[in-house]
Image (cartoon, rainbow, N blue to C red):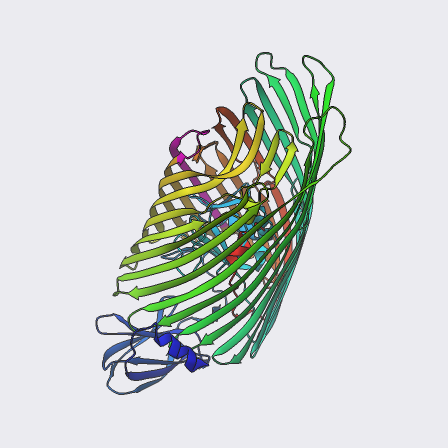
Amino acid sequence: MKQVFNISLLLFSTALFAQIKVRGRIVTKENIPIASIEALLMNTDSLFVKSELTNEKGEFLLDAKPGLYTLQIRQNAKIVASQNFELLTDKDLGQIAVSETVELESVVLVAGARKKLIERKIDRVVFNVENSISSSGGNALTALSVTPGVRVQNEIISIIGKSTLGVLVDDKIVQLSGDDLINYLKTIPSDAIQKIEVITTPPAKYEAEGNSGLVNIIMKKAKENSWNALVQSTYIQKTYAGQATMGSFNYNKNKLSFTSVINYRDATDTFKNNQETYFSDNLWYSSNPFKINAKSLNLNVGVNYKIKPWWTMGAQVLYVQNKRNFDSKPYTSINDYTSGNVNSYLASVVNAKLKPNIKSYNFYNDFKLDTLGRKLTLNLDYFNFNNNDSRVYDGKSVTLNPEPGSEEYYAGENSNIQDITNLSVKADIEYPTTWAKWSYGGKISSSKSKNDIYSFNSGVVDNPVSDFPLTYSKFDYTENIQSAYLSLNKKINKSWESQFGLRMEATQTEAFAEESGTTENNYLKLFPTFYLAYTINDNSSLSINYSKRISRPGFAQLNPNIFFSNPFQSQRGNPLLQPAFIDNVDLNYTFKDIQSKVYFSYSNNLFAGIEITDPTTNTVISSTENYLDTQRYGVYETYSFSKFKWLESSFSLDVNYSISKSRLAITTQEQKGFNSSVSVDNQFTLNSKKTLLFFANYWYDFPGINGIYKNKATSNLSSGFQYLLMDKNLKISLNVNDIFKTAGPRRNATVNNVLNKTVMYLDSRNLQFSVSYKFGNSKIRVQQRQTGNQEERRRTGN
């Protein structure tokens, strides 16, 4: 099998020449073999010739032409050993002992070693969640909200100064969007997360999805030759009390490894959406408070088995069960401009029940094709999301002026039985050569979304509504994507490094809605990425990045289903939505702990939410439309401070200027203006044993422009303590978020010459008290499995 793979790869690689062999064995000073550490050959011009990761016995085998060479032993770009020699015939360098502290398969051998809270690498920012006390006891959404450069506001995830982004878990796009993505992230406990990577220019191997780049959530791994476990309980106090319980168990012995996480969450959130709509004759003031009780169970189990030294097979099962109940009493008063009196009002009662469930199965094979680092990975993925969504509302319209006491009635019901399935096959090949590090591969994905919709809306009638004759309609959506990519990384010399990637994605979609018939859309697009870096010296570097991205609408956004709060206010999907395309350019300069970025982005045909007002019928419809072209020019500055052992701080400042042009005649055709934000994160160590920790974080967004909306200022102050006991295995955390209740967005926009002002709040002020205990052996890690259909899963909205 290995020979078949090698023959097929030769068709895509550079020619191979018969060369002289160099071998050796890397060990610690205690004579312990070091696996997965890089052995790298450099010629007399300090140019990269060949590299390889050592096997389980610490052995490496390199080939090169005759000449003078330097062998460097590296880990995480750090040189831990080196040796000069002349190569004339096959050479065995024997055992090479590494005396410095190194990581064996990502695990530090020296006690007390601790990574920085924030690491700024040349192509990404790494937030080490396991070292953060501000995210302790929370979930993945909590961790993202304190990740540098990322903003979570009104449960929308974005890069500061830019638009929304794609979310990955263990290097794979999550195939969910909107509320469903948020609810899935809430089921992932933050204490099961190792780190979060913020990648603004992702390589071509990743799906092109994500307006401004990607955030990659890396889960903690199982341990090699040991078992380990963690139990945690969290009390959550928002407007209402809630709780979460988490447990994990991991086992790895010889050829078999097993990892598992189970999490249960029961919490109640409140959501307030207050609107002022300035129609020509009356001011409509709407108060729409929601009480949302959410119960979720998340189970993630993975198993790996090493069949041969060069062949590993594994599987992963993900199961998420949700129950969400919504209760709301929307109230709308209609006010006279002249007198200020309330002429009439609408009072409603809305109840909704949702049961979204997720099932995901991944089967994979990893093949090491040789000892030179060449590797083939195959993924087969199946994903299913189903949701029974039922919403009922009723209410009355009461006229106070000029005829007090006049009442009319309305009622409605809407249910949607939704089923989304995705099947994908993915292949990735890593193929380093003496000239460059190549990677290439492809993916075939097929998604089907079926929606059975039952609805009734009475409108305003004279008598209370007792009969609900439901009308049936259906919406079916099919999407097939075929993609291929090629990427190469070239170390030009000691100072210059480049990376180029090209991804091709061919897409075929078909949407059927009974109201509008069948709509088809077929397109083929290329998505180039380019990266060039120059290392000036050990303290400073300069780089430029470019990437082209795509933003596809989520399955829920495409669904034409309509939900009513009352006969005049509703929200709907749009089956005619088209994908948007985004160009991003970043120029980065790093000097010691300071990073400066100048960036530009252009979004074409961007789809976004809009509240469409009709002054003739006094209706407001919340919808999603393709209507924006946006340019954004910005500067982003960050500074990390760690001069004292007891303090680790990070400061950031973003200033950008945006120009948004609307394609809709009912809105302002062009809107431009500045946006800016500042943030500071502080983590304090309060005692010499490093067992008592304290954090204080603050961010402030100045008033600014986002598309057709003008945003008011918002801010967030959060703080908390963490106490470590029993050899730091017992952890007690107390966090308070959004202390002054100032994080809710406030915005206004004019549509159809009608001004609409909105103030929103979603229980961001909360207290979290958590206790966790870990036990077992925690020295060595095993690989965590990645799946291959994450983009489609993200776009189901769950």
Q: Residue at x 25, y 77 (%)?
A: 69
Residue 310 point in image, percent of width and height? 47, 79
Image position of 501 (left or right of 65): right
Q: Residue at x 42, y 66 (%)?
A: 441
For this rendering, which residue is in front, 251 or 750? 750
Image location (x, y in percent) of residue 700: 47, 38
Give the farthest residue toward the front. Answer: 517
Lateral position of residue 304 relative to residue 680, left or right? right
- The residue located at (52%, 27%) in the rendering is 756
Relative placement, left or right, of 775 versus 195 is right
Where 490 falls versus 621 (above or below)? below
Which residue sits at x=43%, y=60%?
Answer: 483
Residue at the right extreme of this rendering: 466
Between 732 and 199, the residue placed more toward the observer is: 199
Q: Position of residue 586 (x, y in %)?
A: 34, 49
Q: Is residue 601 above or below residue 297?
A: above
SS assignment for the magenta stretch, majority = strand
Residue 606 in which image quadrant: top left
Say whether residue 527 is visible: yes
Residue extent of the magenta highlight: 661-683
